[in-house]
Image (spheres, rainbow, N blue to C red):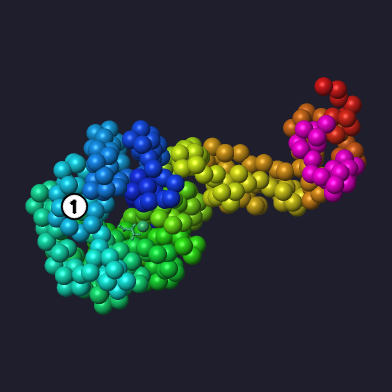
Amino acid sequence: MSLDQFSIIESTLREGEQFSTATFTTAQKLEIAELLDGFGVEMIEMTSPCASPQSDADIRAIVAEGFNARILTHIRCARDDARRALDTGVHGIDMVIGTSPQLMQHSHGKSISQIVDLAADVLTYIREQAPDIILRFSTEDTFRSREADLLRVYLSVADTGLVNRLGVADTVGVATPNQVYAMVHQLVRLTRLDIEFHGHNDSGCAIANACAALEAGATHIDTTILGIGERNGITSLGGLIARLYTLNRNYVSKYNLTLLNRIDRRIAEVCGLDIPFNNYITGASAFIHKAGIHAKAVLADPSTYEILRPEDFGLAREVAIGHRLTGWNAVRQRAITLGLSLDDSTLRAITQDVKRRADVQPLSLPEVDQLLRDAAGVQL
Ligand code: HCA
Ligand code: CU
């Protein structure tokens, strides 16, 4: 298991830039990289220098910052792309080429033999130029590729002894956790190289698939902030953290978890999005408890209905009170918070009053507070 020592390859500045509303300025890239570095991600992946002149300049600007995180760029399997990537001074190069029948036919038109030869050629070229650079080779659309083709490509690349990591990419979000587990497990067993997983979320499995990859021995997981990326994106940084935290808090204690909220908010702002209400950890309702039965138990011991402790993320839980599902424990707790001393029968009567009123329309917290103060004879 590599859950104890996995690394995050944070790709908001590469995959994330492929999201429909993401166009980062240089200043925004610097700000995002700084936040991610502060959070503690091990690697930051950036758009290829071949994408545009600004993309090239931005890689250089981020490398010059001297962050703890290693800076990677992402290129096609081509000598010219490699030359331009090397020229930026990045710490690592992530190279990718499609191996599924769909991509072989419509993306680059090469056969498996040609892919094997080309990969060896470009990887050799990179190693000659930069013996110490972190080098990764990945097959695009791994899970729609033929298994025999994949193994031929991966094993020939592994045999060159030139790469640090192999990448597995669920480019179209089609894989299930079992399939990811089997693929990663096989590559770990056959190559003994580090394995990276990159998973899209088209069918809602991106986080589960990343977790399955780690359970199978993967060492690196690609994420983006809020999961942004091509179409509906990939494994989200916060989602991966939530998933691993709930397995064992120690798996993610190396990260500065209290920064997550700021990071999610900033990306939402930059991309003109709202944070989804059901977002992991930072969604508006992630720590709101409503039904009376839940409120009672959470007030007694938060672990009854919380697997994530909001305070570990610099956030606070909330118990909603002014609705028809409310219970008197929540009402009593609110009275205590307000410093009001009310006996139990009064509190129960107020609870019934709240329910009656909320049947017509939910009450705001100030309205609940007013009922409590009136009952206690307190004037503001
Ligand atoms: C894409 C490429 C990629 C690459 C992943 C990787 C994918 O289609 O835009 O390099 O591991 O999803 O296959 O993002
Ligand atoms: Cu992708």
**In this view of the protein, which residue sits in the foreground, 95 or 305?**
95
Q: Is residue 362 above or below residue 178?
A: above
Q: Is residue 334 left or right of residue 45?
A: right
What range is drawn magenta here? 349-370
Q: Position of residue 142 (x, y in %)?
A: 32, 68
**In this view of the protein, which residue sits in the foreground, 111 or 160?**
111
Q: Is residue 10 magenta?
A: no
For residue 188, which quarter of the picture? bottom left
For residue 3, which quarter of the picture? bottom left
Q: Is residue 199 above or below residue 346?
A: below
Q: Quadrant of the C terminus?
A: top right
Can residue 22 be seen from the camera position used here?
yes
Q: Is residue 368 magenta?
A: yes
Can residue 66 be seen from the camera position used here?
no
Residue displayed at 18% across by 65% down: 157
Residue displayed at 25% across by 59% down: 96
Residue displayed at 78% across by 28% down: 339
Residue displayed at 33% across by 35% down: 26
Most prominent secondary structure in the magenta stretch? helix
Q: According to the image, label 1 marks what residue? A: 81
Residue type at numbered disc 1: Asp
